Each structure stands twice: as structure tokens, then as C-alpha cells.
Amino acid sequence: MGSEQVALEGVRAFYRTGGDIAVAALPPGTARVVASRATGEVFEAELGNHAHFGGLQAGTYCIQAFGPGGTLLAEQLTTVGSHAGERPVHGFATSFVPESVPAVLDWLRALRCTVVQVYDWMESYSAPLGPPGGWKDPSGRDVSFGALQSLAVGIKANGAVAHAYAPIYAVDRPFGEKHPELLMYRGDGAAERLFDNIVLADPSDPRWQRHFASTYGEAADEVGFDGFHVDSYGFPRAGLDKQGRYVDMRVAYESFLESFRAQRPDDQISFNQVNGVPSGLRLPDGPGFRYCEVWPPNDLWRHLEGLLDRSAGKAGFRGSGPALGRSVMRGSIACYPPVWASAEPEAREASLRTVVLTEAIATCLGASALLYGDAVGVLCDPYYPKHERLSAAEAETVLAWHRFALGCRDLFLEGEDTSWYEIGDENGAVSVSWDGPVRPEPVGGGLFVRVVRSDNFIGVGIIDLTGSANGSWSEGTSPGRCRLAHARLLVESPGEWEAAVATLGSGRGRFVRTPFTIVSHREGVGAELKVPMVAGWSVLRLTRK
């Protein structure tokens, strides 16, 4: 899917452990292969029978093959890191019958997913693995064991992690009735529960920890999963154990995750802090990432930054740029824009724009977003099988925005975020203007501008939110009206810098070298340039020559 050049078939894995990449299936006539990042670095491959890159640092790369005259022959995106959760490209899968697997894998491949949450695949929450012939999931859907295995194999063949959905304390009622000593209780003495068929175990109880690690670990090994999404429901806030003692949920979660990590030291583990609860949770060492499911009252785009920061607490401090400690991805957010109620074309366009803007905003905040997956699907409900199916044209739009996000995101992961003392501050060294409001937070009716800096680059992300009335991820959004923005940046020696602009909807979204004008600034001189806005998102980058 997607209107891209012929893919570099040698780059089939969209996540790479370590920095060595060998591209064997080069197009005929290839004279040069390069790997480039949003931060401005360009790496040349050694050419022989194949193209080889050695020692690439963590990041997302566009690998391109060129002919003798500089003609682009093929390209592909891939992500490099110590583990896939370091910079997750998130997707989901929730169809587990043989005929569904090829289409699901095709869409996940088109999205370049590196972590895929396999949702609600279990026969029951207390005993997840069903018989070899297949089973019904807790909602009565068919699950083919063979299809589940094929899905896990295909996900891993793409270089992604097959992430088994695994709720941390969900217990089927029959199991809970046999083991009341493992449960949590309310103040009125009833067991804590989700709906009528699920009661909640105490995550801090070592007996439950052993049961969970044993049953889910065995199931993962049988299916072929190599990671776990450990889910929570955002409550209880005042649970009691069987003896009536208060269960500190922060302590309980941390105890559980440490115990589970000890049992599964190499698996990729994420944990769901619903709406950031509990804030400042300490995650165990090892491959994994922080994950936040977003609910009201965090129903505006401007709430996402605070939610991400509260979730990590002091651990969420993102450093002061590469010189003083490289910033890291804030983790992944999952939200379910409930915007697909109407089938009318105008309403669907507004729904789609809300979704793609949500990922764009998350990217500029230094986070990943779980929105897309299964067979050309997009989330709109916390029960993933209720996702919305995209049309072919809508899928093309999603891929354009999504790949633009991947191509630009390293700027927002590795720079120090200075937005809150640049945009709108009369002493700021960076300013962006047009004929409407500009804000350092994503509010409706204006441009959302994010500024990041390192020793070697300045990045400015500009997202048009003029089509949003309230700046909400749960409402439809009209097309924006900004077509051109003006940027001015203070630089100590303009001749030592060069500018490039990536514009969604133009030039295939690649960074294109752009001239700038040297202008006076209250602190010396600066660079001034025009930033076109075509589809609603542009990124400006200044790099040292």
C-alpha cells in the first residue's frame, strides 16, 4: 500500500537490533545507497554484492538506492535501536482466523510497525491458552491457534515484536470463586470487578504473580510471542486484600512488574498507566516502554503533554539535549477517537483528520501513538475488535501522515524541547508567524509549534489546527486554512548553517534544502525563511554545515 517508490526488498525488517544493515536485493543499476535521518546525518553504504551500513546509531532511517545519474530507484524506512521499545512504532492485531492473517500483516508492514499489540487472543484471562484446535475468546470470537502462530511468525519476520495482550489482574469468576484469597475487595466486602464476568486479583500477591508468569509465559512460548502488553484498568483506587488491608497500587504494580521481569528477562514489556495512574510509576529494567491509555478529562490534545509527564514523574525529565544527556521517547499513548459515527463523506474526512493530527501531535511531543492496525483499521473503541475499517483512499492518507511522522520524529526525540520559552516569548530565539495565533501547545484555531534544539540542529514542527474548534481528539476536525508560515531563528553565525523544510503533501515529504534570508535580531542576526503549509504539517530544520 502507499504511493511510494519500489520498496527496497532487502530492508524487510522494519526494526533492527544494532546498527548493521545489509541490503542484498538492490535494484538494477544501483550506484549509491544512503541512509538518512531527520536530524540531518547522511550515511553512505559500502557497495559490493550488497549494500552494507555499519554502526548506525539508534534512530529511524530512510534508506535510498540511487542510479548513476542520481535517480531515486527505491527506498524504505527502518528503525534501529537496542530494542524495539526504545522507539516503538505501534500497531495492533485482533483478528485470529486463517483468512485474516495476510491482510493484517500487509497493513502492519505498510505502517512499518515495530511493536504489535495482539489483543484479546486468550480463551480465558486465568488460563489464556486454549486447545490446539482453537477456542473462543472471552467475548465469544473464534481464535485459530494456527492463525495466531502464523500472525506471530509474520510479525517477527517484519522485525517487529509480537506483543501479547495480558491484563495484570483480570480473573474469570470461576477462578476467583476457587481462589478468593488472591482477589482485591471493595469497602463493602464485594470483590473488585470489571463488568460481571471479571474480578480483580491483587497484583502484589506472590501467588498471583507466579500464576500469571507461568500461564502467560507458557502460552507466549507456545504461540511465539516475544513480548507482553501488561494492561490495567485505571482502578482500583482503594482496594483491599482478603484480610481487609489497603493495597497500595503503585507498590503492587511495581512489585508485579519486577517479578514478571525476573521471569521474562528478555521479553519486551509495556505497562498501561491509564490516564497516567499511578503517576511516576517506576518501570523495571530491561526492554520495554511506558504506555498511557487516554481518557477524559484528558480529552483535549493539549492534555497529552501533561499526561505523559505525570506518568513518568521525575523519570520523565527528557534531558537537556545530547550534550547534557540525550532525551528519550516519552513512550506510547493509546486513544480511541470516537469520531466515526457518521458515514457521510464530510464527516469521515473530519474524523480522519482528527486521527492523523493526533499522531502528528504525539510525534512532536516525543511520543508514539497506538492508533492503527489489524486489516486497514483504526481504533475508535477500547474493545479493539470494534475498530473502524479505512477505505483505500483513507488508508493512503494515513500512510502519508504516518510515514511523514516516522521521517521527522528523531528531531523531537533527540533535541531539547524549548517551545515554552520560545513561541510567544518576546525574548525567544525562535518565532513563527502567520495571520493567526501561534501556540506552543496544541489548541484549536491556530498553529501548534514545537521547537527542539541540540548542538547541531534546530527543529521546528508546525501543525495546522485551525480546523479544530476545541482542540479535541474526540471531535471531528475540518481542513486547516494556513498555507504559509514565516519563521525567524536567532543563529550566531548564519553562514555556518543550512536550512531544510519537509512539507507533508509536497516533495514526498522529504527534507528539501531551502534558502534563508539573514536579518537583524535584537541579539545579533538571524535566519528568516518561508515555510509552506500544504496538507497541514511542516517541519523546519537548521543544521550546521
Image (tube, rainbow, N blue to C red):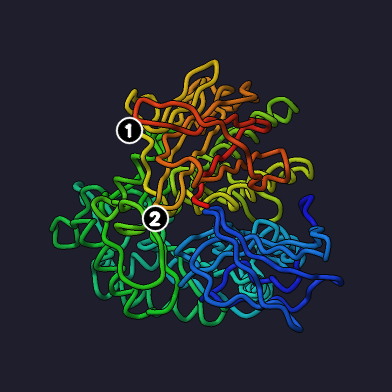
Return the x and y of residue 381 as percentages of the image width and height: 55, 43
Return the x and y of residue 167 as percentages of the image width and height: 42, 61
Q: Is residue 361 left or right of residue 396?
A: left
Return the x and y of residue 342 as percentages of the image width and height: 68, 29
Specify the quadrant that holds the N terminus: bottom right
Q: Secondary structure at mark 2?
A: strand
Q: Count neighbours of disc 2 (C-alpha within 10 A) and say few if under 14, some if 14 to 19, many if 20 or more.
A: many
Instruction: Give whichever of discs 2 and 1 has the lower sequence position.
Output: 2
Q: Quadrant of residue 463?
A: top right
Figure check: 157 above or below 443: below
Q: Which numbered circle lies on residue 405? A: none
Q: Which residue is mark 1?
A: 421
Q: Residue furthest right?
A: 28
Which of the two residues, 490 or 119, is positioned nearer the viewer here? 490
Q: Count neighbours of disc 1 (C-alpha within 10 A) and say few if under 14, some if 14 to 19, many if 20 or more.
A: some
Q: Amino acid at mark 2?
A: Asn
Q: Is residue 167 left or right of residue 94?
A: left
Figure check: 160 above or below 371: below
